[in-house]
Amino acid sequence: MGNAPAVVHQGVATGYAQLDADANRLARRFIAAGVGPDRPVAVAVPRSARMITTLLAVLKAGGAYLPLDHTYPAPRLAHMLADARPVLLARSLAVALPGDVPEIVVDDPDFLAACAAESAADVTDVDRISPLRPDHLMYVIYTSGSTGVPKGVAVPHQGAADLVAAQAATIAPRPGDRVLQWASISFDAAFWEWSTALLSGATLVTAPAEDLLPGPPLRDTLRRERITHAVLPPVALDVTDPTGVLIGGTVMSTGDRCTTALVAKWAPGRRMFNGYGPTETTVGTTISGPVNPTEDVDIGRPWRGNGVHVLDERLNPLLNSEIGELYLTGNGLARGYLGRPGLTATRFVADPHGAPGARMYRSGDRGHRAPDGRLYFAGRVDDQVKLRGFRVELGEVEAGLVTHHAVDLAVAVVHGGLADARIAAYVTAMPGRRIVGAEIRNHAARTLPEHMVPATVVVLDALPTTPNGKADRAALRERAERSAARARGAGVRDGAPFAEVLCAVVAEVIGVPDVTPDDNFFDLGGHSVLATALAGRLAADFGLNVPMRALFTTPTLGDLAADLDVPD
């Protein structure tokens, strides 16, 4: 592709030839540091062309990349490093991580000078520590774990060719197209995005995280960067105005259930697809589309090299639209969970309907196959949920809460709609101990990533139970909905200071009953989608243009009210 733009970040383009040469030089430094087949390399580099160069270099060296979002809590990153035991950490100067893993600082001037002396020629098996095979690891992605411990999904190269073929056959990127890198590096959707662009000759567009927030920031980025292809979760599509973006282009919904309302909103004037597949496959398994708003939204059919069985409890096939559990098969299956043979054996099981030795992944998803072969998603069989496109095991949230020394029991539930869905947690105290919900929430925030931290934590004398003695999650969900409704109807008195008005709006947006000027928006349970909603409310109700950065950087709501300079 020569000088054609491969990656564009904040207006600066890196050509294909330069990207390839830089990755080859860096790969040689990685090999010299011991990187090779089945040897993970932790990568902690912010969104940029250098991030893509680093990921490519790991793969060229024959290693498997372990992507680390440096904004995650330090204990979680420390666990991932200790659990995966990478041979090397590749980080940027701006990132500091716990642990004692040997490291390379990829943007250090001295290291860059050393890289420049390396050969830019393609790296081959002659250069690698040992030959690279399709069954060697490509990446390790950590996902939420029901036991409270994140688990590393080990994905080999063998499903990548089928994935690229599926991309070419459906979303069909071409040279000249511009593909948005929206997903965090720590999610496998990021691999879909950069492989979509770089393995088709298109341009990958990266941007700072604040420019990708659902709503006006995302819409502005889509327009400014002239994006033609984007993969976004339903929650981002729900709160982002499609007017004037991706016209004639392609959008794919993935990560959560896509609705006919979203299709009606986004499909006109574009090609829209719906993708499905857990991290335990090579990004995905099935794809549907182009979809249209006149039909129920399906998840399509497996792409080449993959398969889906709809089975009952005895692993018998279900036909004629009967709902069962989805078992996934084919080249795209992960090896399993890194260092957890027992857990791997329970989820990756023998395929009685396949060739000898074939495996299938028990997805935990329910669905059915229509007579025409299309598959439909019908929910979960366990307590795993999707929240704003993130996969969350409520068991892990609960496990994070009970690590507090004074918490006895904890139950987490999800309530709300697509864009305003949130986690509410209910806890009981150990005998003789007094706790407050804010303290427990702050404790959880020190170990859980932002999307898993409960919006509210309520301390109860006892948890409600069902007749069989289990925690009554339905009753707790109803309680959370009632609490949110009360917050929405709280209102403010006439002539109140703007700080009080702002607190009332925040209470309504987040769905918590008590908000004061001393509170921080995110400590109350706010997140990026709710920040977008708050900015929209302030614009609609008061004509205020609130920079998204201000919501993230202003310590308290009182400070924010003062900065907005609204006369009382």
Image (cartoon, rainbow, N blue to C red):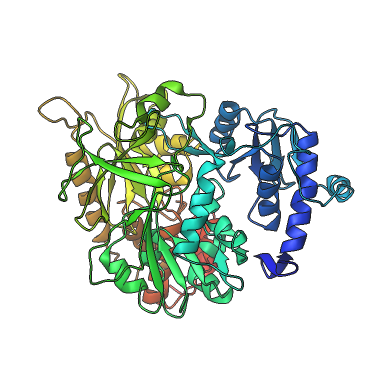
In the displayed orientation, state which residue is furthest to the left: 467
Is 3 situated left or right of 515 in this image?
A: right
Q: Position of residue 185 (x, y in %)?
A: 57, 49
Residue 361 x %, y %: 36, 36
Frontmost residue, 358 versus 11: 358
Q: Is residue 175 shown above or below 465?
A: below
Residue 31 versus residue 504: which sits nearer the camera? 31
Instruction: For residue 506, say whether it is visible.
Output: no
Tell me residue 242's x, y (percent): 41, 75
Image quarter (top left, top right, bottom left or bottom right) of the C terminus: bottom left
Left or right: 195 in relation to 537: right
- Does 413 sit left or right of 212 as displayed? left
Using the rendered image of the protein, determine whether residue 538 is visible from the camera's viewpoint.
yes
Q: Tell me if residue 268 comes above or below residue 258 in the rendering.
A: below
**Which residue does the image show at 20% across and 32% down from the upper left?**
313
As rendered, which of 533 and 10 lies closer to the eye?
10
Q: Residue at x 50, y 47 (%)?
A: 188
Query: Total label count?
Result: 0
Residue 382 quadrant: top left
Is residue 284 or residue 503 the one in the foreground? 284
In the rendered image, which quarter contains the N terminus?
A: bottom right
- Residue at the far front: name it: 355
- Residue 224 in percent (x, y) is at 57, 76
Residue extending furthest top? 431
User: In the image, is residue 304 above or below residue 262?
Assistant: above
